[in-house]
Image (tube, grey):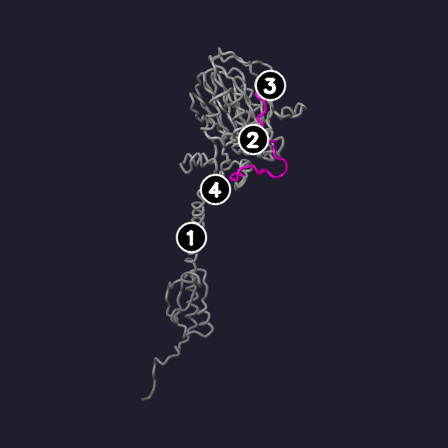
């Protein structure tokens, strides 16, 4: 169920630039997950949504830690909006790293982070991961952030469409997150605002199932409270299997009477803070509009209830499990296999070339058509490949050698060098018989 946020005592000040924010926030564990790993915060100067990644490594701690660092921005900002946002994101990144160092069981935890710092006329945006920020203006919605995900890279390459990305088996793989180890390199940019604008920051539990048209329909009417509640309700009805967190803020003229709104902390950040203070983590009914009426979280070991759509329950990988290792899946598998084969063939060729070069420094004495010949190479053959060839012929013949010497020549007499081979031939020449064993000289009497 949803969770209420902790509230500060101070009232929301009017923005120095003539505009201010009316805001609301809600976070819901959803119908499938047992724990809420989303965290969010809204105040007069800053809006933050984080989606924890980590499973057993406690993604809720990562998101809560990041929000607790980023909410410190909630005070009148300096002129350097992006510098403040970048600094806060790096401090959150460092703090998560410190927690992992203190407790190695947290290794692998990380969180997305989308933060908007308001100065009265514009936003300074910082973004890492796949949580999103939208601007609804004059009846049209535009996405301010760009997902750091594998499927977004496929969209950028023109390989899939936005609708196809929503059902892609690797749609939950994120490529950037705050993890205390790898530098996140957040996207940083400004957004100019005008009275009448409406802002939405949400986790992918909402943006993953609601397209721009549905988001615009909900944002078109009602108060920020109403819009936030309806966004969560619509996400769950659309089959979201994740935690859902939505922050809605209206940009209004500073002269407009305000409700003296208090900052709101929601999700894991609020729950962990209550526990740290010894309180009981109750259900969130306090989005100033009543309960959203979602189902209770599913108990037991089965992570997917019967009412989850077939397309989700038959996903080849568990969406949350996939997010625990923000690494892209294998791409261009055929090319990688071909490249690996080329490497193997190249290594084999180089090995063969080296062996051939070595063989050409070897010599032995052998037989060719009854003559003693010095061969260059090794005294062996492979099918279809000769490893030696005649190098020098001699005037020593086998029929003038003893049977033993002739046999050793036929078998091949190894020599360490050409000089050794020539010495072997000299020794054999000295053993030749004067009698050739033929009748080349006839002394008959006629």
Find numbered disc 2 in the image and state the secondary structure of the residue it sits on.
loop
Estimate how packed mark 3 is, as few (under 14), some (14 to 19) or many (20 or more) residues with alpha carbons within 10 Å. Answer: some
Find numbered disc 3 in the image and state the secondary structure of the residue it sits on.
loop
Q: Earlier in the sequence, mark 1 or mark 3?
A: 3
Decide: is 86 above or below 337.
above
CA distance for labels 1 and 2:
55 Å
Q: Residue furthest left?
A: 446
Decide: is 229 above or below 9.
below
CA distance for labels 2 and 3:
22 Å
| Relative image position of residue 224 (x, y in whole percent) | 52, 20
Kindly identify which residue carries mark 3: 7
Find numbered disc 1 in the image and state the secondary structure of the residue it sits on.
helix
Kindly identify which residue carries mark 1: 349
Q: Are marks 4 and 1 in contact (CB under 8 Å)?
A: no
Q: Are marks 2 and 4 in contact (CB under 8 Å)?
A: no
Q: Earlier in the sequence, mark 2 or mark 4?
A: 2
Q: Which residues are magenta?
A: 288-312
| Relative image position of residue 333 (x, y in whole percent) | 45, 45
Q: Earlier in the sequence, mark 4 or mark 1?
A: 4
């Amino acid at each position: 169920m949803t969770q209420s946020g902790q509230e500060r005592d101070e009232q929301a000040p009017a923005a120095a630039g003539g505009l201010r924010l009316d805001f609301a926030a809600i976070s819901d564990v959803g119908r499938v997950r047992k724990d809420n790993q989303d965290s969010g915060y809204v105040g007069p100067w800053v809006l933050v949504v984080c989606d924890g990644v980590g499973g057993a490594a406690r993604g809720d701690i990562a998101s809560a830690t990041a929000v607790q660092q980023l909410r410190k921005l909630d005070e009148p900002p300096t002129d350097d909006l992006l510098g403040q946002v970048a600094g806060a994101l790096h401090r959150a990144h460092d703090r998560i790293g410190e927690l992992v160092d203190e407790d190695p069981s947290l290794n692998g935890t990380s969180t997305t982070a989308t933060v908007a710092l308001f100065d009265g006329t514009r936003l300074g945006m910082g973004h890492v991961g796949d949580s999103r920020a939208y601007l609804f203006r004059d009846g049209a919605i535009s996405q301010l952030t760009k997902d750091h995900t594998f499927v977004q890279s496929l969209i950028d390459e023109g390989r899939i469409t936005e609708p196809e990305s929503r059902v892609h088996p690797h749609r939950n793989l994120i490529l950037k997150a705050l993890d205390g180890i790898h530098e996140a390199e957040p996207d940083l940019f400004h957004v100019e605002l005008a009275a009448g604008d409406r802002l939405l920051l949400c986790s992918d539990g909402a943006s993953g199932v609601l397209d721009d048209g549905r988001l615009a329909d909900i944002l078109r009417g009602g108060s920020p409270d109403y819009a936030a509640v309806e966004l969560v309700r619509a996400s769950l009805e659309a089959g979201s299997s994740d935690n859902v967190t939505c922050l809605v803020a209206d940009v209004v003229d500073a002269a407009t009477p305000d409700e003296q709104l208090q900052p709101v902390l929601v999700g894991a950040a609020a729950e962990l803070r209550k526990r740290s203070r010894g309180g009981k983590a109750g259900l969130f009914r306090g989005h100033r509009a009543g309960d959203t009426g979602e189902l209770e979280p599913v108990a037991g070991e089965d992570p997917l209830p019967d009412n989850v759509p077939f397309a989700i329950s038959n996903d080849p990988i568990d969406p949350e499990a996939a997010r625990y290792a923000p690494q892209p899946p294998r791409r261009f598998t055929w090319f990688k296999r071909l490249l690996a084969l080329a490497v193997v063939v190249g290594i084999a060729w180089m090995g063969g070339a080296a062996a051939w070069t070595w063989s050409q420094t070897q010599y032995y004495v052998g037989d060719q058509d009854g003559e003693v010949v010095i061969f260059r190479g090794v005294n062996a053959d492979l099918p279809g490949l000769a490893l030696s060839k005649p190098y020098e012929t001699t005037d020593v013949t086998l029929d003038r050698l003893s049977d033993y010497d002739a046999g050793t020549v036929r078998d091949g007499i190894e020599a360490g060098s050409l000089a050794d081979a020539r010495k072997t031939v000299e020794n054999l020449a000295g053993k030749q018989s004067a009698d050739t064993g033929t009748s080349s000289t006839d002394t008959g009497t006629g």
